[in-house]
Image: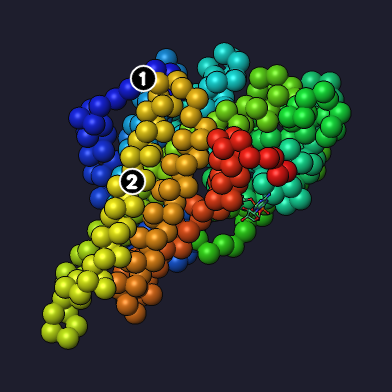
Amino acid sequence: MNAAQTISDDDLEPIRETTRALCRRFPDAYWRKVDRAQEYPTEFVTAMAEAGLLAALIPAEYGGSGLPLRAASAILEEVHASGANGAACHAQMYTMGTLLRHGSEAQKRRYLPKIASGELRLQAFGVTEPGAGTDTLSIATTAERRGDTYAVNGQKVWTSRAEHSDLMILLARTAPKGSLPSRTDGLSVFIVDMKAAPKDRMRITPIATMINHATTEIFFDNLEIPADALIGEEHKGFRYILDGMNAERILIAAECIGDCRWFIERATGYAKERKVFGRPIGQNQGIQFPIARNHVELHAARLAVRHAAEMFDRGEPCGPEANMAKMLASEASWRAADTCLQTHGGFGFAEEYDVERKFRETRLYQIAPISTNLILSNVAEKVLGLPRSF
Ligand SMILES: Cc1cc2nc3c(=O)[nH]c(=O)nc-3n(C[C@H](O)[C@H](O)[C@H](O)COP(=O)(O)OP(=O)(O)OC[C@H]3O[C@@H](n4cnc5c(N)ncnc54)[C@H](O)[C@@H]3O)c2cc1C
């Protein structure tokens, strides 16, 4: 990601239109079908990669388009506003940042051009563990140095897209918790070649969920990875992961803005058409006001997302702004989802209207990649200076 790079709304419009045109090839019926079958939307992800949209943030010298985060945000916003779901491929945009910022030149030359061309997928991000949850510094998966290799042992949970990725960014413990002077040291980041991993050493089990997210559990049993899979310095991995969080928050917030637009558009359209008691339901203020409120909330959240993305693109620290944008956008999209379902009455529950699918999908963003409570905790302590609670 290039610091101090800005882009105007006019310059973003062709990128938005390219994304919209691609998404028109994947209408509601496509998403309904993959959702019902819990299938990975391979055709969509391939089309996004072929159009170069997933390589927006990869610098031109490594085969990408070297665009700022605002452009990547616009892409994911349009994907979601079209009724699609970027969760099948959005991780590549932010996980790639860890490699770009902290990887060696050899690692970048080896992987980034192939990721940019779509030849390799970097969609898996192995951080969360069942025993640690949000407390990332307590993860227990270990990577033990043995000569020219590391042996990985442990378990990850919620590693999404693992069965559809060639590479994984993995966070693992390289020193016992509390054994190094700095509280945040002791974890390291690796780029793992998933296709080279023997199945009995890296066992992937899908988790059935309320949304079609291709998420999994991964069990590592003495998986040997080459020592040069280490990204950056040993023990500094937690900071590298934190470094990438602002981009992740802002991109997810942009997806929520897209969802929010979709719900408002669908609710408005249905409210104009559906006639009950001989007039459109949208003539009733009881139907109008919640949709109007959603529009007001969308307006505010959109400004917050834009502000955070612009700060990020100028290379300014934007942790609180990225967090706040993500919280405002995820709450705006969730409230719009509720209004949209209510406006549709019973038909909101029918699969063919897609409202129930998008309703389920947008709910995720108040929990992942960071829950609302954790954002509030961050704002309370880091912005307002309240006492640390954990
Ligand atoms: C569909 C899906 C896909 C995911 N994909 C990935 C992925 O690809 N890679 C990955 O690494 N992870 C992934 N995750 C994991 C996700 O990031 C976590 O679920 C999320 O960070 C919340 O952590 P947790 O589930 O462990 O909740 P927990 O940490 O167990 O927390 C449970 C609840 O308690 C609250 N809570 C916890 N501590 C506090 C506190 N101190 N104060 C107040 N409230 C608190 C939380 O806000 C939360 O609501 C995914 C999750 C889902 C559901």
Residue 148 versus residue 365 in the image, above or below: above
Residue at disc 2, CB closer than 8 Å to ligand 1? no
| SS under mark 2 | helix
Q: Mark 1 against mark 2, which lies toward the viewer? A: 2
- Which residue is located at x 68 percent, y 40 percent? 387
Location of residue 188 (image quadrant): top right
Name the residue at 25% across, 27% down: 8
As drawn, is 368 to the left or to the right of 136?
Answer: left
Q: Nearer the viewer, residue 102 or 41?
A: 102
Q: Is residue 298 visible?
A: yes
Of 338 and 101, the residue lying toward us: 338
Q: Which quarter of the figure is the N terminus placed in? A: top left
Label 1, secondary structure: give it. Answer: loop
Q: Horizontal and vertical percent for residue 380? A: 59, 42
Q: Which residue is mark 2?
A: 300
Q: Which residue is mark 1?
A: 5
Contact? badges 1 and 2 (CB < 8 Å): no
